[in-house]
Image (cartoon, rainbow, N blue to C red):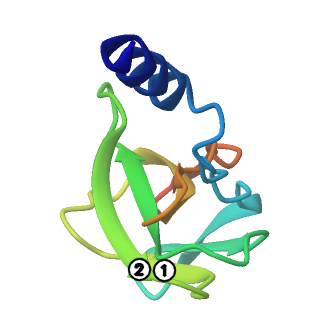
Amino acid sequence: MKRLIGLSALFLATLGCGSGAATPPAAPTSFATSILSGGIHMTWTDNSQDETMFMIERKDPGGQFVDAYTVPFNITQYHDTANLKVGSTYSYRVRAMSDKGGLSGYSNESSTMLK
């Protein structure tokens, strides 16, 4: 009987039933990029109250999105000047991360050509 109770508890914990599973933070919205001071400036709306940081992903021309930068909680802008080439278009997206709730969904994507 003890083994059955132990297995039932393990099963319920695995499913998240009764475990108080944390909810992911709300995704950022209104993500936008623009050219500023020789780089690409990003802004977004912070819709979560419990994020630990924001994770910014960048897609270089012909590439895929990769983790590029992290910024602390409650920051809603970032300025990218790393390895950018004039005449190339870069795409970005951002999501919130919480130590307790994991990752939010992604913001909208935004692309800008550096001139």
Please tell me which residue is depicted at 46% across the width and 17% down the height of the picture: 11
Residue lying furthest left in this view? Answer: 83
Q: Amino acid at mark 2?
A: Val
Q: Earlier in the sequence, mark 1 or mark 2?
A: 2
Q: Compared to 105, does 85 lie above or below?
A: below
Q: Nearer the viewer, mark 1 or mark 2?
A: 2
Q: Position of residue 106 (x, y in %)?
A: 61, 44
Q: Position of residue 61 (x, y in %)?
A: 34, 34
The N terminus: image quadrant: top left
- In the rendered structure, are the residues bearing label 1 and label 2 in contact, judged by CB atoms less than 8 Å apart? yes
Q: Position of residue 35 (x, y in %)?
A: 56, 73
Camera-side residue: 48 or 41?
A: 48
Residue tagged 1: 78
Please identify the quarter of the rendering in which residue 79 is found. Answer: bottom left
Q: Amino acid at mark 1?
A: Tyr
Q: Which mark is residue 71?
A: 2
Helix, strand or loop for disc 1? strand
Please tell me which residue is depicted at 79% across the width and 69% down the height of the picture: 47
Please tell me which residue is depicted at 58% across the width and 82% down the height of the picture: 77
